[in-house]
Amino acid sequence: MAAVRLLGLVSSVCLVLLRPGGSSEGEGKRPGGVGDWAAEGFRVPQFPEVGDGLREELVIAPLQSGDVAATFQFRTRWDSELLRKKVSHYRLFPKALGQVISKYSVQELHLSFTHGFWRSRSWGHPFLQAPAGAELWVWFQDSVSNVDQTWKELTNILSGIFCASLNFIDSTNTVTPTASFKPLGLSNVTDHRLLRYAILPREIVCTENLTPWKKLLPCGSRAGLAVLLKAERLFHSSYHSQAVHIRPVCRDAQCLSVSWELRQTLTVVFDMFSTGQGRRDWSLFKMFTRTGLEACPLASQSKIYVDLSSKDQENKLFDVSPPPTSVQEVSFQGDRRQYAIFDLQDRELFNSSRNLNIMLKWKGLQEKGEPLAPVLYTERYISGYGLQKGELNTVVYNHHLYRAFPIIFMETVPWYLRLYVHTLVITTKGKENKPSYIHYQPAKDRLQPHLLEMLIQLPANSATKITVQFERALLKWTEYPPDPNHGFYVSPSTVSALIPSVIGMKTDSMEERPLFTTLFPSSDDSSYFVRLYTEPLLVNLPTPDFSMPYNVICLTCTVVAVGYGSFYNLLTRTFQREEPRTGGLARRLANTIRKLRGVPPL
Amino acid sequence: MGLLSDPSRRRALSQLITRLNTPLCIMSYIVGLAWFFGLSFQPFTLRTYISENAMGSTMVEEQFMHGDRALSYAREFAGFKKKMGGMPVAWLEKTMRTLGLEVYTQSFTRILPFPDETTERYMVKGTNVYGILRAPRAASTESLVLSVPCSEGDSNSQALGLMLALASYFRGQIYWAKDIIFLVNEYDLIGMEAWLEAYHNVNITGMKSSVMMGRAGAIQAAVSLEISSDVITSLDIAVEGLNGQLPNLDMVNLFSAFCQKNGLLCTIQGKLPRGDWDSFSTYLHSLETTMLMVLKQGSGRPQGDHGLFLRYHIEAITMRGINSFRQYKYDMSTIGKTLEGMFRKLNNLLERLHQSYFFYLLPSLSRFVSIGMYMPAFGCLILILVLKSLDLWMKLTKSESVEEDGVTDTEQESKPGNGILSLVAPVVICHATGLSLYYLPIMGQHLATEHFPVSESEAVVLTVIAIYVAGLALPHNTHRVLTGAGTERGWMMLKLISLLYLAVQLGCIVLINFSLGFLLAVTMVPVAAAVQPVGPRVLYAVLLIVVTPATTLFFSIFLYKELNEYPLSVLECWQLFLQAIAGGMLDHYLYGSIVFPFIAFFVYPCWLQLWNIVFWK
């Protein structure tokens, strides 16, 4: 009985993750806000049905640790049936990606490159977290017959497009999650066999990945918010994450036809401590060393949001200058937040000064206390010592004071850590916590990784510890990388949760809502979706001393050949005393003759 | 191997071994000793060099110059410490947080198995404070540790001040690729053990500690800092860790490279390096340094907070600021620069330190003796045991074959079985004494304090000594149990077993802790080879007592103090001896040192077997 109920829970979570309600955010009318220049220059008369639009926005949020997070979102929407008919005319939508989608029958594609780790505990929840390294997950159309082959080709193509080592994605790091990743867009497919998921935790992100990413933008980095994306500033930060999300969405409220949506997001966290000598005031110039912003002429909307909400709601702690165009209250992640909006398409904004340099000044000096932890955060580490065994520990904290909620926990462990699944223990408040759903797919040596998915209920205000022991495998000596003593990476595990929200969210005015609130579909007022990634781990495997293989081979061969051979000989042979040979040639001759005669020898 | 399969040549070889046994043994002992003493002679040693490419040449330019800030932090800390009468946890947390670190605390409690009288500790309750500097754009997979023990009294506040000043300087830099953990541990080694166990989520020693919240991945290297004066004249490095484990030689090289770069005077074992090597006094100097290292390593005791890191495969050293009566003094900025340089080099590491040696002896900071060089010395000593047992084996087989010819069949069948069986009793009794030496003192401490006017700690030490000495009376009692005693074959068989047992023990321990194995081998091996129940029995007994592990410990303490130019009277030495016994046991219970159980379970029973041979009736 209990099992049935728990299974119901799983399906309800999955269902919420599935429902594409949030993505049906039609824009009502065609991109009317597109600048006149764009309308005249680009609208080609023989394709009147080409409806595509670009919205760009930048959200600046001071984090409670004193750092500042800046999130760029560029959304290109294209009202086109990419998969149904052959499309050869591209306007705003990048042709490189469009062709990939149609060639490989991609339903949904999510790719992120991240340098650094989003520290949920001190920074709060991000709009969209990404794991350190590169992450790629793709839903294919059900018309794809050989998913693995298509996946392999797709990763190689993307590797070329984004100048990344995505070609290292192979069967040893690809998994097919059953519950954690559901389509974010419009979709009829829920068969998880069409999903492929991979993380490369070691991938290092740099300007070579940023440049192709910027090239996908309709305005490139020459106009619009993208002028702020200067590599030397973006990589002078605590966290840098860039992502590409492609999904089909409803064209309008009736949802009779499909549009394709490309979202390019870039999140960067500036460490105001090291750059500002401890002062937390910031300005656009200080962060990006650029001002002179203008809206991208192709964009229908171009806005900058500044998060004004703070822990202390009563008195404002800081001043924003110049005065914003408007102030909007947005409900996001179960919280009402106030945002100052700077509309770059509003001429009045530029009246006061030529250059828009948004500044934020703190009133008085803040006492830095213990940062307030968010509702859900995680911690992960390896325990034990020595090179034989170890233990993977993941601690998931629920800081909600009175509500329990379920999470889907997903762990991908490479095959060379041999998980002892019988040692899997989940404890909450000292008691064992039985997961209501477990999907475990064991590893195959050199072929596929372990995949462990569980649905776990987190009681209110608790810490849940998930431990599983493993044994470190001894690799073949050619399988070690050139730096074997660096250690081997274990990719981050994923925690997906529907967190009960404090306030009820309004879902009616989707059109008005800023982009950052509409990535994850949410149809329920009482909860919001969060996906967190834990830290990647570095595990040392037993490593032979590679500095002297030649010596070792010579020595062991010699020892084996000389020592073992002769000792074996000595041990197995039976010794007999041999009579000393007396007499010379004459005696031997005589004996030969006697032998021939059949007489016993002398 | 034709040598062995040819009977006549084999006979010749065995005759050589039996006839020339004693000269061969003496020669091999002399060669072994000479080899060991030759290790300190500079032309025979190698120069140290940095093997790790990532730490290659000293290219970075250090810019730390906040020595004054370090001193003001130190004064503030000392003031708060005095006011609180302990570690000012709240102040540390607040200061570290304002520096921009992620601050965590970890509290621990540990009840010692018996009160420690030298440090006056029994129920230890403390808190470790640590702040993590998160490296930008890194996913917290690797980290480095800078730790400062918060000791009792006034000492070490300068080290803490310097650590905070460094933290504040490091926080503003953008080149960090690994997180840096700044750790202040209370109660020295106990706090460090608690922190390390909590960080790696293991419980080896029965420590109770709170759940640890903040972690920073796999720790790659650690430096522990001890400075107790505003200016210093030299920096000393301590390398010997728990059970004689040593950090990778590159850590030592890194230290000496940056000391040289900043013109700091650096020492090892408190001994200054000397340039010339051709004079005899220089040789004696480096011999003293080597001997100090051997004694410290042989004790199995961590010579600083770094010693506990080594178990977790974290390369670590302790740096100690020394303030003596030299003219030239160095200020905090210079030490800070040295540390900055070291941390930047460690930050550059792509892999764990693994290129250089893990087993070495250091006659000076710029010279080292690798495992391949010092092992032959030990090999020569072990050879004595092998030669002697071969000799015994041959004698035993010869007498057997002689008997075979002369004695009737019935006797023959009973003999061999009886020979081995008769030895079970003394071997078992000796080991039972060893077990009681390990278990009784701790179990019986309360009983002892009830009946005798002694403290727990005294009770434990005195019980250990009592059991140890009581073992000497065994031969007079065990022979009653022995049925086959009294024969020539009996003691030869026992001696053969004891010698092989000793050889195996020493061979094993020398792989873990060379110094301990070598010290035991130098003392025990010649006497073990010589003892027999015939001839000058009293002399053998005296010799055996002189080489028993307890006496070796006593003489080692004497030698250690002598080498430190701090001569002792016999009474003081006895006091230190008692402390060392208690300390050795505490090391075992608190940190997991293996010296005490190794002596109690293996070396002492083996020695008792030899003692039995002398008094064989």
Image (cartoon, helix red, strand yellow):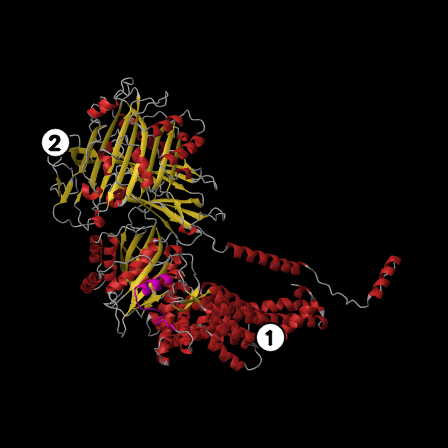
Q: Magenta stretch: give its range.
A: B253-275
Asked where in the image residue B461 lies, by quadrant, the reply is bottom left
Q: Quadrant of the C terminus of chain A?
A: bottom right
Asked where in the image residue B343 lies, by quadrant, the reply is bottom left
Image side of residue B356 versus residue A560, left or right: left
Residue located at (23% from left, 32% from top) = A56
Q: Give the camera-side residue of B143 and B609.
A: B143
Query: In the rendered structure, which amino acid carries the disc numbered 2?
Result: Glu
Q: Is residue A275 above or below residue B279?
A: above
Q: Which residue matches tag 1?
A: B21
Q: Is residue B248 above or below residue B493?
A: above
Residue B60 image position (x, y, % from top left): 31, 57
Mark 2 and mark 1: Cα distance apart in space: 106 Å
Q: Give the camera-side residue of B508 and B536.
A: B508
Q: Which residue matches tag 2?
A: A348
Instruction: Say if the magenta span includes residue A255.
Output: no
Query: In the rendered structure, which amino acid carries the disc numbered 1?
Result: Asn
Residue A239 image position (x, y, % from top left): 28, 43
